[in-house]
Image (cartoon, rainbow, N blue to C red):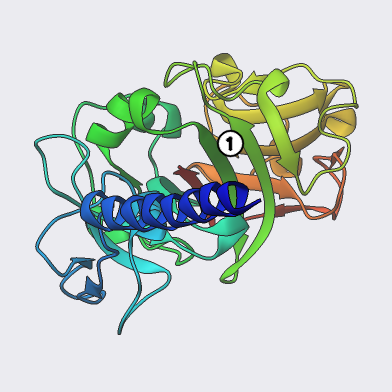
Amino acid sequence: MVRTLYHAAILFLAGIATTGMAQFNAGMFVRAPKSLVGDDATGRNYSDGSYGITCHDYLNNAIYYGSTGDGVYWIKPGSMLIKVYCDMSTDGGGWTVIFKHTSGVANDPYVLWDTTTTTNTAAANKATRETQDYVSRYLVDSYVSNFTQARLEIFLSGSMKAYVKLNASGATKYTWVDRSRVLASSYTDITSAAANFFSLDGHAYYTRRIFLSSIYGGCAGDTLWTVSMGPVNDTCGAGWHTYGAYQIGFCDSTTACLAASTTFKEADTMVITMR
C-alpha cells in the first residue's frame, strides 16, 4: 500500500514537471504576438519593422493597437515591399485588393489584368469610384503561391451589391474564374442555372469581359449575373451599354437577370480580392 502511494506521488510530480517544461519550451519557441503601427497615410506594418506576406498574415499574427481594420498596409510577399489595401472585415477579413476596375474607364479589364506593370496604386481603395483602374502586377503574377481564395465583388454608391467567392488553389491567374470553383455567392442560382460564358476573358469578340453569363437569347433575352461591357462589335445597344467606354453591369438581385431589364444596373467598381 505504501509502495503504491509512493509510486503514485512520483508519477504526479513527474507530470507537473513535464507540463511545466512543455509550457517553458512553448514560451521559448512560440513567437509572441506583435502590435501594429501606422495608418492609411503611412501604411500599417508590425511594430518591430517586419511585414506580412499578405493581408491575412496581419490577422493571424498581430494583436491590434491603434489604427486597425480595413485600410492601407505594407506587405512583403517576396523581396519586394508593396503597399496594398486590405479588407479586414469582409468574410473573416484578411483579403488583399489586387485589382479594381471602374465603370466608364476606357481600359479593357482583361488586358489590364494581363499587363506587365503595376498601375494606379492610388486607386486601390476598395469601394470608391475612381477615374482610373488599379492592378498590382506583382500580386497578379505571384498569387498562385500566396493565395487560395478569391472574391469578385461589385460596388455601387459605396456598398457591395454582389459577390462571388471562388477557390483559387491550383489555378493560374487566368483560370480561377470558373463555375466549378465557386464557393459562395450573393447569387443563389450561380451554380445551378444554365451558364455559357464564365471567365475573365469572357466573350472577346463582343468585348464582354469578366463575364458571368447564363443564357444568350438574343439581345432582349440575354441573361447574366455580371459583366464589364466594351463598345467593340456589340450590337445590343442601350440594353447592354450606354457609352463608348467599359461599363460594369450587374444584376441587382439574388439571381441572374435579363440584361435589358431594370434589374440589370451599372455598377461603380468591380474589385478582385484574394487571401
Viewer-side residue, 260 vs 6: 6
Q: In which quarter of the image is residue 73?
A: bottom left
As helix, strand or loop, the secondary structure at mark 1 comes to strand
- Which residue lies at the image location 19% right of the left edge and 54% below the top edge? 51
- Towards the viewer: 240 or 272: 272
Residue 205 against residue 273 in the figure, above or below: above
* Residue farthest along the front direction in this orientation: 2
Q: Residue 88 in the image: x percent, y percent?
A: 47, 63
In the image, residue 238 above or below residue 68 = above
Residue located at (66% from left, 23% from top):
181
Percent across and percent down for residue 52 are: 25, 51
One can see residue 235 in this view? no
Q: Can residue 14 be seen in this view?
A: yes
Residue at screen point 12% across, 47% down: 81
Q: Name the residue under label 1.
A: 229
Picture quarter with the C terminus? top left
Q: Residues within 10 Å of mark 1 (few under 14, many from 20)?
A: many
In terms of depth relative to the viewer, which is nearer, 133 or 30?
Answer: 30
Give the amino acid type for the residue marked by disc 1 in the picture.
Met
Q: Nearer the viewer, residue 151 or 240?
A: 151
Tell me residue 104's x, y (percent).
47, 51
Is 53 situated left or right of 94 in this image?
left
Percent coordinates x, y for residue 35 in the rendering? 25, 72
